[in-house]
Image: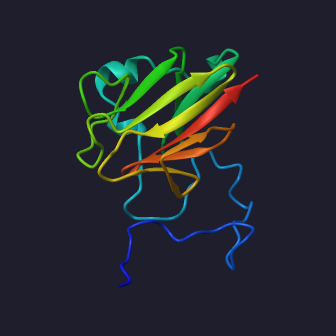
Amino acid sequence: MATTTPFPPPAGPFTADPISDAGATDALASAPSEATLDALALLDHSTHARTIRPRLALRGSYLAFGDGDEMRLIPLDDQITHIGRGADAQVRLEEHHVSRDHAILVRHGSFFRLLDNRSANGTFLNDRRIVATNLTDGDVIRVGPMVMRYLEVR
């Protein structure tokens, strides 16, 4: 019995429809979708207060949030960072499609690992649904309909 899933179709070097590098320099480029939202406008007040402008970023790891032409960064200083709608999340998103404790970023030495925390709408990395994966500079993270980018400033 075949069932359909809500996962985005696969794309990449091993499929018939490879990903192009045309939009690689866009601040928060992602697959075109009317259901995808820029996350900056939907950060709660305390999370938005912790953001910095990209030109002020020191060496380290950040989550980048955009809204039109504006981009802001949240430093990833803790060993564990919770992303979600709940009051105890360090990165709190005010969007009803985001679970209370949607995803977790865990620092493992010099790199970060992204884990889906059994969320209802899934966590996606570069338009692929994940359970757990390592992050690299420039990865696009989608939590529900919210889009953000993982950045490393060196």
Q: Residue furthest front?
A: 1
Is residue 100 shown above or below 34? above
**Residue at x 39%, y 64% (from the top left corner):** 34
**Image quadrant assignment for residue 154:** top right
**As drawn, 92 above or below 42:** above
With respect to residue 13, does 86 lie above or below? Answer: above
At x 58%, y 26%, the residue is: 62
Of residues 95 and 136, the one drawn nearer to the viewer in this rendering: 136
How was this image coloured? rainbow
Total labels: the figure holds: 0
Considering the image in quadrants, where does the N terminus appear?
bottom left
Q: Where does residue 150 sit, x and y in percent of width and height? A: 59, 36
Q: Is residue 82 left or right of residue 74?
A: left
Q: Nearer the viewer, residue 112 or 141?
A: 112
What residue is rendered at 52% in x and 37% in y?
114
Q: Nearer the viewer, residue 22 or 105?
A: 105
- Where in the figure is residue 65, as x and y percent of width and height? 49, 36
Name which residue lies at 58% across and 22% down.
107
Q: Is residue 9 left or right of 11 when viewed as pictured?
A: left
Q: Residue furthest bottom?
A: 1
Q: Position of residue 142 (x, y in %)?
A: 46, 48
x and y percentages locating residue 115 in the rendered image: 48, 38
